[in-house]
Amino acid sequence: MKKISIPGRTEPLIIDHLVLDMNGTLTLDGILLPGIAEMLTTLSAELTIHVLTADTFGTAETVFGNLPVRLEIIGKENQAVLKWQYLQNLGPEKTAAIGNGMNDYMMLADAALGIAVLGYEGLAGTAMTAANVIASSIGSALDLLLHPTRLAATLRN
């Protein structure tokens, strides 16, 4: 569990789960971006980490097999709804979500904390408008959770 106090809010964010999109967010062309494995491992001490993917490149098991994450391979159709349903099962009020694609907008909008990532594959406009925060990379997005005072500075009233 991660408790994040944000000035101007009456209640802190209490985050138990982190849901992440794989392609375009954590990976580029199916390959995990540098430094991300270490960040996920560190965050897993406080959060249950879930990676959702249609496994477009067929690399998900290889990429995440030795990392402390729960890998969920979802269908290629209706991904926005499937990701949103997954979030609902975890409890959106205690979940942070990170993604970059059009199929991430529903989970970003409904999560207690939605972070959209502008990465190598770009950032869908729907994801951008659905998120609470936009990060310049997955590393900077994960850093917001590793260093929550940065997040508090961005979200304070």
Image (tube, helix red, strand yellow):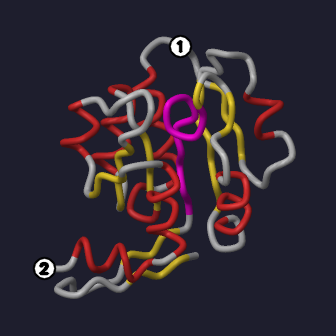
User: What residue is disc 1 on?
Assistant: 76
Q: Secondary structure at mark 2?
A: loop
Q: Secondary structure at mark 1?
A: loop
The count of marks equals: 2
Q: Residues within 10 Å of mark 1 (few under 14, many from 20)?
A: few
Looking at the rendered image, the quarter that the N terminus falls into is bottom right
Residues at marks 1 and 2 touching, judged by CB atoms closer than 8 Å:
no
Residue type at tag 1: Lys
* Position of residue 109 measured from the top left corner of the image (x, y, whole percent): 28, 46
Magenta-colored stretch includes residue 48? no
Looking at the rendered image, the quarter that the C terminus falls into is bottom left
Seen at 67% across and 54% down, the residue is: 35
Q: Residue at the right extreme?
A: 66
Decide: is 37 above or below 8. Answer: above
Residue type at tag 2: Asn
Seen at 61% across and 22% down, the residue is: 29
Decide: is 144 above or below 82. Answer: below
* Position of residue 48 measured from the top left corner of the image (x, y, whole percent): 65, 60
Q: Is residue 52 left or right of residue 95?
A: right
Q: Is residue 17 left or right of residue 94?
A: right
State which quadrant residue 23 falls in. Answer: top right
The tag earlier along the polypeptide, 1 or 2, is 1
Q: Residues within 10 Å of mark 2 (few under 14, many from 20)?
A: few
Seen at 38% across and 76% down, the residue is: 13
* Position of residue 115 measured from the top left corner of the image (x, y, whole percent): 36, 53
User: What residue is disc 2 on?
Assistant: 157
The magenta segment is: 17-27
